[in-house]
Amino acid sequence: MTARRTYDDWSARADKEVKGRDLTWHTPEGIVVKPLYTSADTDGLDPGLPGFEPFTRGPYASMYTGRPWTIRQYAGFSTAEESNAFYRRNLAMGQKGLSVAFDLATHRGYDSDHPRVVGDVGKAGVAIDTVRDMEILFDQIPLDTMSVSMTMNGAVIPVLAFYIVAAERQGVSQEKLSGTIQNDILKEFMVRNTYIYPPEPSMRIVSDIIAYTSQHMPRFNSISISGYHMHEAGATAVQELAFTIADGKEYAKRAMEAGLDIDVFAPRLSFFWGIGMNFFMEIAKMRAGRALWHDVMSGLGAQNPKSKMLRTHCQTSGVSLQEQDPYNNVIRTTIEAMAAVLGGTQSLHTNALDEAIALPTDFSARIARNTQLVIQEESGITNVADPLGGSYYVESLTAALVEEARKLLAEVDAAGGMTAYVATGKPKAAIEEAAAAKQAGVDKGDTVIVGVNKYRRDKEDHLDTLDIDNHAVRQSQIARIERVRGERDELACQAALEDLREGAKNPPPLGEGGRAQHGGGGTLADRPPPSDADASATSPRGGGFGSNLLALAVEAARHDATLGEISQAMEDAFGRYDTMPTPVRGVYSSAYADDPRYQQVLRGVEAVERRLGRAPRIMVAKMGQDGHDRGANVIASAFADMGFEVVSGPLFQTPEETRDMALEHDVDVVGASSLAAGHKTLIPELIGLLKDAGRGDIKVTAGGVIPPQDYDFLRKAGVQGIYGPGSNVVECAADMLKLLGHNMPPAGEAMDEAAE
């Protein structure tokens, strides 16, 4: 009989094979991953069964053996008409639910005719200004049977109100509506920055939506607590887990403080994870999230098992997509989709291969959708509930993530909860540090990205991408706004807006009638659900729902108030929130301490400083309404470490504001960060403004998501450096020195081959 081999036996043999090389992997999460796992690693671990508490193995017993996950494609194309046509084509081809991507003007609560959104209308999603736009968006799509997911946080009140009223005009009552509104504002203050109002009134908005939907929309998920945007901003799996679960806990506590029974609203809470390329880490992350949420909700007193059941939507990573060798993105998306499925997602969106540089074409969207169909129909994965359950590695990794996330959750609790913790700036700084460290690893080649920093092609294939005529879209939206305003009852509309404004300014101290605010007196259990779509049921003037902001906005929407008008009414009470970025320091200098090219750049910066009598000065600018600031923060962090004086501009600047700040600080270069296609409008305008001010000597560069076909346009407009996705940050700095007159040697050449 052969003796049972142990880990030590294996280790001795493996050590001999690899000649003593350490095979241990130290992950960004601080988890030590061994090269082999055995039954000894799962001693004492009991993940339970699918459908049973703590739901580690899945929220439902049958999982995909009974019904597969819902296939969603996140889409919005300039106009409601274009988006509707795309939805109908996809539904005909097997898609089961709709996910709406809104343009940045909509996200930020501006109508398309607002002067601050000239470059943003229709560029990164669909423009929604009125209920009429929403009606067109869902034309011939039955809202009583179709699940609709909407990624919206800042302008969540008017968007949800428009959806409700569009359904009413379709003849669909509110209790029949199903889907999800993201409504996760806390993560906006950490990473995505698509906020409008300060934190406290924003949290009131969240509570009012939970209250309203619990009462009137029992099939609708009132919030999708999003780790996805933390993932995309560079968070580690532990950070994404802990901060997302902490956000969910904060929302639940706020709803309870507003008088809601946890077991009434909690079953409609849902989550949203980003899925990256670390295959098993992503699977374990989803399993750990369910275990953590179960514990949190139990601690808050939930009794209903459905309240403790974390249900989730997932999206494959946008950040993992690359401009270089783009068909590799199909492979990346497939791997990420498999991780989401094996992790037990309830719905899934797969990104298209061209989304690193533009909105997807029909061609790329079809491949993305079919990726899910092939997994569902051909792989056999759906035949077994939680097929990876019991894996030594997966169970051990799940337990390690739970342990590490609990440490971070304890830190949040010690700070007084997530709202207070966000106010400290710690979570934002931690995620930015993780993002900078990851980018440094990519730039050095320690983290391999095929086709980008290894196995790079000499010449890239041409890739057709979707181009949106921003000017034409904006003009068509303005024309529709004018028609709606011309046809509405103006007095009734303004009265409804004033009711909303007053409701925002003067909420009852404890809600209606001295009771906690949940939509009217008594408890939710005392209130029967509405029987039809009668507007009086939710009309404040008809005696319903008091000062609930969503109810007041629904009434304004019924009178055809625009999105900008509804947002402005609340802004009159709450103000508009803004922050100044503070990039992290020291990540690049630490990672590159012994790198020869980095040292060349440092010496180049010193040479320019001697010539100028000061350090070279670069302003990192974010123009337009895009709040994604990962790239801008990484550049600011790295350039500061390399000795540049960095001026970080605030988010959401106009070209005029950027010009004024550049002149005030006497910068040498403006680096304009673009992620949402406003570069063709906003950057040329900035160049013209600098020339008009007599400072055409200030160099303007562009970085971010810029399709290659736009490069010639930008160069002709006067852009002197273009740095698209996959650009090496150290080489960007070297190129910047050349623009400032320094004879920087090419990468790989010695410094003494070039003179200052």
Image (cartoon, helix red, strand yellow):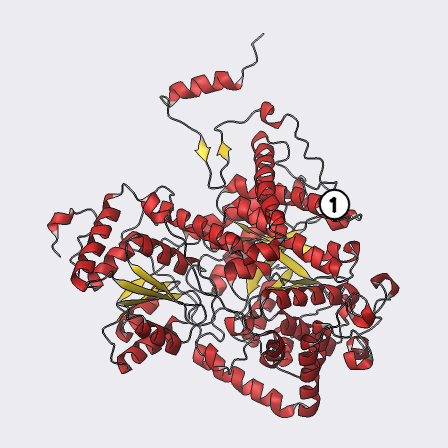
Residue 632 appears left or right of 298: left
Q: Is residue 279 above or below residue 723?
A: above
Q: Is residue 284 above or below residue 672?
A: above
Residue 745 % position (x, y) = 17, 53
Q: Is residue 595 above or below residue 102?
A: above
Position of the N terminus by quadrant? top right
Q: Which residue is mark 1?
A: 298
Q: Residue furthest top?
A: 1
Visible in this render: residue 585?
yes
Residue drawn at x 59%, y 37% as measured from the top left? 403
**Three-letter amino acid code at the position of disc 1:** Ser
Which is more toward the observer, 680 or 400? 400
Residue 224 appears left or right of 695: right
Which is more toward the observer, 402 or 42? 402
Residue 90 % position (x, y) = 58, 63
Residue 710 % position (x, y) = 34, 69
Residue drawn at x 52%, y 19% as measured from the top left? 7
Visible in this render: residue 454?
no
Q: Is residue 197 above or below residue 736?
A: below
Residue 133 % position (x, y) = 60, 78
Q: Can you tell which quarter of the image residue 610 is in? A: bottom left
